[in-house]
Image: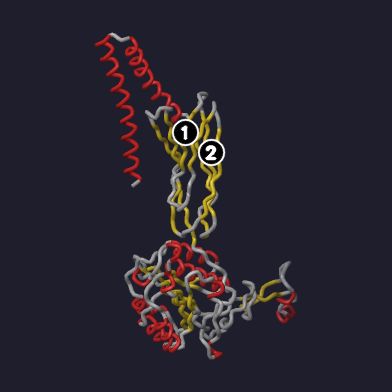
Amino acid sequence: MQQLLALGAGARRNFNVTLAVVITVGCFVLAFATGFWLLFRLAYLTAFALPLLYFWTKRMADSIDVEVHRTTQRVTQGQPIEGRITIRSRSVLPKVWLEVEDPSSVPGHNAKRVLTLSSRGVASWDYRTRTRVRGLYTLGPVRVTASDPFGFFHMTRTFGDPATILVYPNAPDLPNFYVPPANLPGEGRIRRRTHNVTPNVAGVRPYEPGDSFNRVHWPATAHRGQPMVKIFELDPASDIWLVLDLERSQHAGLGEDGTEEMAVSVAASVARFFLNAHRSVGLISFDHDLHVNEPDRGQNHYTRLLEALALARATGDVPLTSLLIEESRRFGRHTTVVVITPSATQDWALTLMSLQSRGVKVAAVLLEADTFGGTVSPLDVYGTLAAGGVYAYTVKHHDDLSRALSEGSDPSLGRIAPAKR
């Protein structure tokens, strides 16, 4: 569409120049045929004006400099992208009707100005565009178009290189998320500790200024004759595998109001919760291809997961059941699997129960696709999960994730997270 519009604009500009040339030639012909002095003057005026307008427009386009400063390349959904555009004239001649545009694929981005520069003048402005949809977008290069007052000639120059902007999915904080533990020492209701204080001592080292006295290992201090402190290691804990269902046929709704966006946001929030608790988190999904992020810890790994989720799209053709079966070799007795899906088919629930029978700890976050515009209710699959003792959350359209994923209960109390109706 943009190419067609550009071709149409080019045709109109060429038509203006062609019309002017035809008028000039016509005035000369009529002037010589009739000898009317006014036609001669009009022909001379247009013949002189056209080259003058052309070189003036070319000069305006050639003698400018543009600087683009972009302050952000990675943002979270809802945060703004910001930047500054500065245009300078290197000519003593004024520049009028300069059209400056910073094109972008970011929805809602509008950084376009029409301005006039005085002799060696400078103009600048800031842009700030709120990001509404996660994904990878482009910005630039900046286009500057100069034109004459009559619209005969338009000359465009580009400045800078295209820049990419990655918009991460929104990941609300989950204050009380719970999944069944895998019965390792570091499991159970997760208690947040500092990164270097756990019940497990890996060794001792000499005391250094700033070490807390409650970490002093007194027997080693007495034995070596100098203060020694304990070295801690992380608690042994199971890997958390997030399985994100991206099968096209199971998702409902479009854009920000679809199950795709909600599922990605749930995955990002759950990953954030466990990584903040110093757990190892992995991610499995299948859109146009299989994507596996092996379990790891730390902020760098969280960034990698956000990058993968930012590009995730519900374009897959592999059912969730097949994905779980194919990747089941990754799930051992000390593994917790969290499935995130809008699927109302019961096959994947039965597969999850099969994994549970092997000793794998399982949980599910079930998106109620019928509240997103889908036609199938998830009541049957929820009933299957409940009958099989699978810990499950349900999420509706417009639910607050911080609340919807914090209303679970411990299976040891004989209850399962309630379906909200």
Residue at the far left: name it.
33
Look at mark 2 in the image and give the residue it sits on: 86
Q: How far apart, in angstroms, are the residues tagged by discs 2 and 1?
A: 13 Å
Mark toward the start of the polypeptide (2 vs 1): 2
- How packed is label 1: few (under 14 Cα within 10 Å), some, or many (20 or more)? many
Q: In the rendered image of this protein, does residue 371 appear above or below residue 185?
A: above
Q: Amino acid at mark 1?
A: Leu
Look at mark 1 in the image and give the residue it sits on: 98
Q: Amino acid at mark 2?
A: Thr
Q: Report the residue at 42% width, 82% height from top.
A: 379
316 or 94: nearer the viewer: 94
Q: How is the image coloured?
A: secondary structure
78 or 159: nearer the viewer: 78
Q: Report the residue at 53% width, 91% height from top.
A: 414
Q: Position of residue 17 (x, y in %)?
A: 33, 27
Q: In the structure shown, which secondary structural element does the residue marked by tag 1 occupy?
A: strand
Q: In the structure shown, which secondary structural element does the residue marked by tag 2 occupy?
A: strand
Q: In the rendered image of this protein, does residue 402 appear above or below residue 112?
A: below
- How packed is label 2: few (under 14 Cα within 10 Å), some, or many (20 or more)? some
412 or 190: nearer the viewer: 412
Q: Is residue 219 left or right of residue 23?
A: right
Q: Position of residue 72 (x, y in %)?
A: 53, 52
Q: Position of residue 59 (x, y in %)?
A: 44, 26
Q: Is residue 180 left or right of residue 341?
A: right
